Image (cartoon, rainbow, N blue to C red):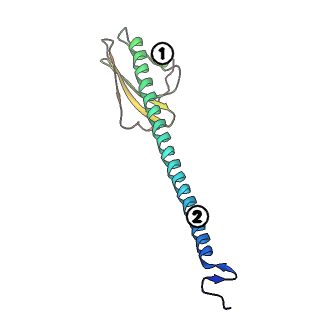
Amino acid sequence: MNPTAQQRDGRPAGLLARAAGCVGAVVLVCFLIAAILVVLFFANLHHVTQRRDRDAHAGVVTTAERLRLRFLNANSDGTLTRHEIDMALDHRPAIRSLRQEKTRTVLVIEIGASDWVQCYSYTALPTGAVSSAPLKACPHSSTLIRPGP
């Protein structure tokens, strides 16, 4: 008896085809699961980075407002002295520039939280008012002024 085309080495050809198909399906499923996991990992990483940036930016804005209120308190007499500036900054060297005139005092302060750094301009008037505004870019560090007594 001659073996038929459906049999090779005593096994039906259909059994080998089914086994190869199952192995291929398992490989394909494993590949799809791995691809989904990679996509989820990078999506989560992007989300975490955005949340950290938002939190850092919110921290900078909060610190800037808190600092404005300190300057407002220090400027209650209409004069913001170097000592009052130093006390409001808690002796941290964050002043990028300081310009004191008869009609106003203008400070540029660098405020940082995590990876977010932004400079704010504070203007203290003889009326006791203090305003602040974020700057698009910080001045060069070569203009850094360290407040002293």
**Based on the displayed image, in which of its 4 quarters is residue 24 positioned?**
bottom right
Image coordinates for residue 67, horizontal then vertical, percent: 43, 20
The answer to whether residue 143 of the structure is visible from this angle is no
- Image-based side of 57 in relation to 101, left or right: right
Neighbours of disc 1 within 10 Å: few (<14), some (14-19), many (20+): some
* Image quarter hosting the N terminus: bottom right
Is 40 rendered above or below residue 27? above
Q: Mark 1 is on which residue type? A: His
Q: Quadrant of residue 127?
A: top left
* Residue at 37 percent of width and 8 percent of height: 77
Circle 2/circle 1 CB separation < 8 Å: no
Q: Is residue 104 above or below residue 140?
A: above
Percent coordinates x, y for residue 17 in the rendering: 59, 74
Badge nearest the viewer, 2 or 1: 2
* Amino acid marked by disc 2: Val
Mark 2 secondary-structure assignment: helix
Residue sitting at x 42%, y 33%: 118
Q: From this view, report whether residue 36 is shown above or below residue 1.
A: above
User: Residue at point 55% right, 63% down?
Assistant: 28
Furthest-front residue in this view: 1
Q: Label 2 vs label 1: CA separation?
A: 71 Å
> Looking at the image, is mark 2 or mark 1 earlier in the sequence?
2
Residue 115 location, x and y as percent? 50, 37
The residue nearer to you, when weighing 141 against 42, is 42
63 or 89, nearer to the observer: 63
Secondary structure beneath dot 1 equals helix
Mark on residue 83? 1
- Residue drawn at x 37%, y 9% is 76
Find disc 2 in the rendering and name its residue.
27
Total numbered badges shown on the rendered structure: 2
Residue 88 in view, yes or no: yes
